Amino acid sequence: MEDVELSPEARREQDALRVSVERMRVERVDLEVENRAIQSIIEREARFAIHLREVLAASRVERQAIEAEKSRIFSAVGHS
């Protein structure tokens, strides 16, 4: 294949395209990094929400146990 001599205008367009393509590549890489960070924080937040639900469930169980124990104690005191 023969080398084709580009006109000055075509060279300027080619250079402008190279700059644009490189800028877009850099932007894409930056977006990929941001997307990974966002995905990571979403996953962390989901794990935290699960943890909070587990803590809340355990707290409810403990609260019920405390209330049952208080009822048992107060019932026994009332019957003495």
Image (cartoon, helix red, strand yellow):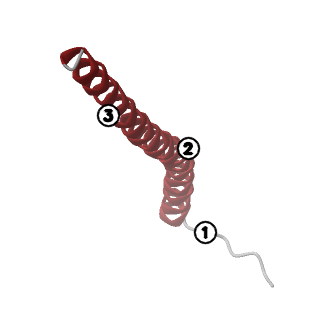
- Residue 80 position within the rendered picture, expressed as x and y whole percent measured from the top left: 24, 14
Which amino acid is tagged 2? Val
Observer-side mark, 3 or 2, equals: 3
- Residue 14 position within the rendered picture, expressed as x and y whole percent measured from the top left: 55, 62
Calculate the distance from the C-alpha at mark 1 to the C-alpha at mark 3.
83 Å
Does 73 sit left or right of 3 as displayed?
left
Calculate the distance from the C-alpha at mark 3 to the C-alpha at mark 2.
47 Å
Residue at numbered disc 2:
33
- Residue 59 position within the rendered picture, expressed as x and y whole percent measured from the top left: 37, 31
Is 74 located above or below residue 14 in the figure? Answer: above
| Residue at x-position 47% and y-position 62% | 9
Observer-side mark, 2 or 1, equals: 2
| Residue at x-position 57% and y-position 48% | 29
Calculate the distance from the C-alpha at mark 2 to the C-alpha at mark 1.
38 Å
Which amino acid is tagged 1? Leu
Furthest residue in direction front, as rendered: 80
Residue at numbered disc 3:
64
Say which quadrant the N terminus sits in: bottom right
| Residue at x-position 18% and y-position 17% | 78
- Camera-side residue: 65 or 13? 65
